[in-house]
Each structure stands twice: as C-alpha cells, then as structure tokens.
Image (spheres, grey):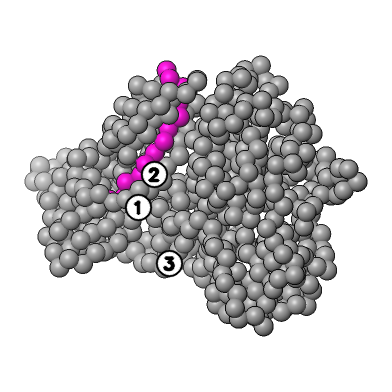
Amino acid sequence: MQNIRNISIIAHIDHGKSTLADRLIENHGLAANRKMKDQILDSMELERERGITIKAQTVALEYARDNKKYKINLIDTPGHVDFSYEVSRSLSACEGVILVVDATQGLEAQSIAHTSLAQKLGLVIIPVVNKIDLPSADTESVKDDLSNLLKIDKESILEVSSKTGVGVGSILPSVINSVPEPLSDSQKPLRAYVVDSWFDNYLGIVVLIKIIDGKLKLKDKIKILSNKKEFIIDKLGFFTPNISYLDELSAGDVGFITASIKTLDAAPIGDTISDPKNNDIQPLPGFQEIQPRVFSGFYPIDSKNYQDSKKALDKLSLNDNSFTYEPENSLSLGHGFRCGFLGLLHMEIIRERLNREYQLDFLMTVPSVTYKIITKNNETLHIKNPKDMPPMNEIKAFLEPIALIKILTPPQHLGSIIELCTKKRGNQEDLIYLSNSVEITFRIPLSEIIYDFFDQLKSLSKGYASYDYQVEDYQESKMIKLDINVNKKRVDALSQIMHDDNSYRKAREMIENLKDLIPRQMFEISIQACIGSKIIASTSIRGFRKDVTAKLYGGDVTRKMKLLKKQKEGKKKMKKIGNVEIPKEAFYQFMTPKK
C-alpha cells in the first residue's frame, strides 16, 4: 500500500499530456521499448489522426528509489471541453494530478477548469510547465500565473520538455514525495469502484476498477451494488499499456476485470463492486454526473441498417456515460434515434466512430438543446426535439438553458470577442487581467454557443482564445418554433427552435440555403419558413422549361397557343400530385453553417 500512487495528467487540449505520458512510459513503463510509438495511450486511430485524446487511458509504471519499488498508476485524460466528463471520472480514481501547462500558450480555460475540479476533490496538484525548449516559450510569466492560481511558491513548479525529455526525470520523485498513498485497507471487505467499461469482441465487457478495500482474485464472486447482479471473475490484470494478466488485485490497485458480463448495463460506470456475502456495504460516492447538452436526430442512410445501428449505439453508450439515445421517427427521414451529446465535437466524434468501427453512415438533424416549457395548465415539459413542442397558444412560459462561459484570450483580441458574445445575446459578468492574457466571463444562452461559437472565437483570436463553460440555470426567453414547408408540406427534420429576435434573418438564410440544395423539377417548388401558420420568408425553385412548340413550323398562331395552354394545364396537374424528393445529403449540408 505504501508503494502505490494513483495519478492523472490534466491540461488544456494540445499542451502535451500524451507526449509527457509517452516519456514516462519510455523511462518507467513495463512495456518493451520496441512496442513504443508516439501517443501510445491514444489507442483509437481517430485520436492519433486528430492529435486529441478522447478516452482516458491507464498505464502502470514502476519506479525504484532507496531499494524500494513504487507502482504508479497513471491516467492520461482528454483536454477538450466536450470530454470533461472523462476527466471527472479519472480524477475520482486518483490521489494526485500532474497539471501540465504549455510554456508558449500559458494558462488556458480547461487547465483552470480541471484544476478547480481537482481542488474540489482534495487532490494533490503537481504543476509542470511543458515545452520550455521552444523559442517562443515564456516560462517565467507562466510560472507566475500558476503560482497565483495554486497559491504556491513558483520555485516548486517543475520545468520540462516532453518532446526532448528534459526535466521529465524530476516528475516521479515529486509524485512519490507529494502524493499520498491510497486510503485503502486490504483487510476490510471488498469494495471496488467502476472507473470505466468498454466492449471487447473477444472478452465481452471489460471493466476498469479501482480497489478501495479488500482483495480480488480469479474465480471470486462479485456483486454490482446498484442492480444486485452477481458474476464470477474470469480474468484480471492491468495495462502496461499492453494487457498484463495477474492472479490478484489488492487495495489501492487500478486494474481491469472480465466476468462474462453480457448485458451492457450490468456494470454502470461510477457503481460499486462488493462481495455478495456482505450486505452492509455502503456505495462509494460516484463521479461527477454530466447530462447531455446537445441533441440531434441520427438517421441511418440505409434503412436496412436500423437494427445494426441500434447495437452500435448500445456499445458506444456503454463506455461513454454522457452519450444517450432513444428511438424516434420522422416523416421525412424514417426511423432513427434522438441522440444526446456534450457538444458538437462530441457529436462529430460519435458519428466518425460509428462510421469507422461499425461501417455505419448517418444523417444528422440540426442540433438543439433541452428547453423547459410551462404550459397554461402549469405543467412543465422538457423539450429536446422541436416536433414535441406544443402549440404556441398553450405555452405560458418558455425557458432556455443559460451557460456561464469563461474565455481566456490575449488582450489585443478582447474587443472583437466581447462583440461576438454580445451578438450571441451574452451578458458580461466579469473581466480579470492576468500577466499576458485576459479572463472574461459571460452568461450566454447555451443554444448560441453549441453551433458555430468555437469556430468564430478561434478565427477572431487567430487561434489563441480558449473557453470553458457550464450550464448554470434556465431563464425565461422569447423563443419560437420555425418550420420549413416545401411545396406546402412541412419537413419535420428541418424544424428549429430559436429566439424571436433572430427568426427573420435566420429564416431567410435557411430557405436560401435549401434552395441551392434541392434539385430542380419539371414544376415550380415553393419553399416557405413559417412560425405557426404565419409565413415569414418565402422563395421558389423554378421548374425546367420544355419548348413544346419546337416541332411547329408555319401554320396558324392558334396551333401554338393551343399547345402552350395544354402544357400549362399539365404543369398544374403535375404540381398538384408532384411530391418533391429532398436528397438525403441536403439535410447534412443544410445543418453545416456556411463559411
């Protein structure tokens, strides 16, 4: 027990967490060096391509000092705001964290957010300034900001270069000196915490656990506390990062188990595992529960893939606790699923994973957030889908979610960022000057920041600004439901809930966008944007013109007029019975904001 340390690496995206983990594994890992590769803990091809961590990964390190061998369980965590739930889960299995800050970028939003989460959990924080070898590194001012944030002496902050390995040797001694051993007891009855779980084609469901008390051996019987299900341990071990099997895991260890668990909800993340004979076990406090914030309809492009899609979504929702789905129908797109995500990047990653891992392609509807509606009967409804919204004459109050957003930016971009936030209906709360950046706090409706806010923020600040947000509460707002009619028929997949102030401008943009995406037919197609029965914007796609008089030559003019009249009647009839087919690709292009 005295020789075990459990730590996480936390930082903003692209500050060098995975590279630092590579150096630590290279120097102290149990894996053979010939198996080393860059970003070794980023096991997904998608993570390596994008250079981001999506799933938290664990690895066991070994460090020897004063004739003692220490086992250090290291967890690499994601840095993007959409994956902060992974961080909360990882930190719940640790006693300390390594906070990595880029010497060229300085403190950024996610660094501060993860630090405050670690402080709330009472973890020991070891600050590390990374990339000190780069010419643009401003190590001293970054150390000043860190010492102010953590209220510590700047001399205790470590300086490293993960790429070259300079200073990395000082990290593990600092971990052993500062981070306490796990508060666990191997003599007590078994209590283990489910940190993560995922589906493996050969092993079934693999469960990553931290053993708080007691021991776990092969063929032991375990009980999942929330659902009282019992299983027998088939295999157990830890990652080096390759799988290493053991006969026993004891208190303080972070490792994995397989137990022929077949159903996906049998071992929920954050649950407690105990001995079936012991009925007095108290559940361990779970990690931070995060609810999905953004909802979108996912419809299989090929309707034959509906059952395969359901199985794939099942498997993804198992090890991604913040991803949810439920079946839904659309008149335009057929059978599909209403999926919940933490943000647009999270949604994009899930769609990409479904495509790569399960060879499934989906169409997505326009993302929306959860609104609260109080009806005139004083009933409260939670609306995730525009088509579930009651008629406007039945609504007493409409409430939308408000996010508290903290933006860190270099001072020269402050004016344009305040202007952007004001355009997005934001109210300024606070403004703090740091040594080489400004922290500005706004209250902004969540619906305004999930769509294209991140892209605009990055382009206005030349890529330097970063942000972190959390949903605070709901506030009454003047919202409307905008419907799109194509040839007098409502297309439910294109309906949106939006603020009344923006409705006319957005309606015009939407119908002009759709006009470019729907192919021309033999008859004129009308496109209308409506609020209830009121049409607020309208356009049309002209039909193809066929020259029916081309075959005529000479003769009386009445022959020509007769033919044109016949064509006109035919087009009227065609328009009456004509059903416009909107290509499925149009729905995806319609959702993507125009640059």
Which structural element holds mark 3? Answer: strand
Residue found at x 39% / y 55%: 295
Tag of residue 240: none
Residue found at x 50% / y 26%: 464
Residue found at x 56% / y 69%: 283
Magenta stretch in the rendered image: 400-412
Q: Position of residue 109 (x, y in %)?
A: 49, 35
Q: Quadrant of the N terminus?
A: bottom right
Q: Which amino acid is tagged 3?
A: Glu
Q: Earlier in the sequence, mark 1 or mark 2?
A: 1
- Few, some or many C-alpha atoms within 10 Å of disc 3 (few <14, some 14-19, many ≥20)? few
Which structural element holds mark 1? Answer: loop
Give the residue pinned by disc 2: 450
- Residue 40: tell me if it is visible: yes
Q: Position of residue 465 (x, y in %)?
A: 47, 29
Q: Is residue 285 on the magenta stretch?
A: no
Q: Quadrant of the C terminus?
A: top left
Q: Which amino acid is tagged 1?
A: Val
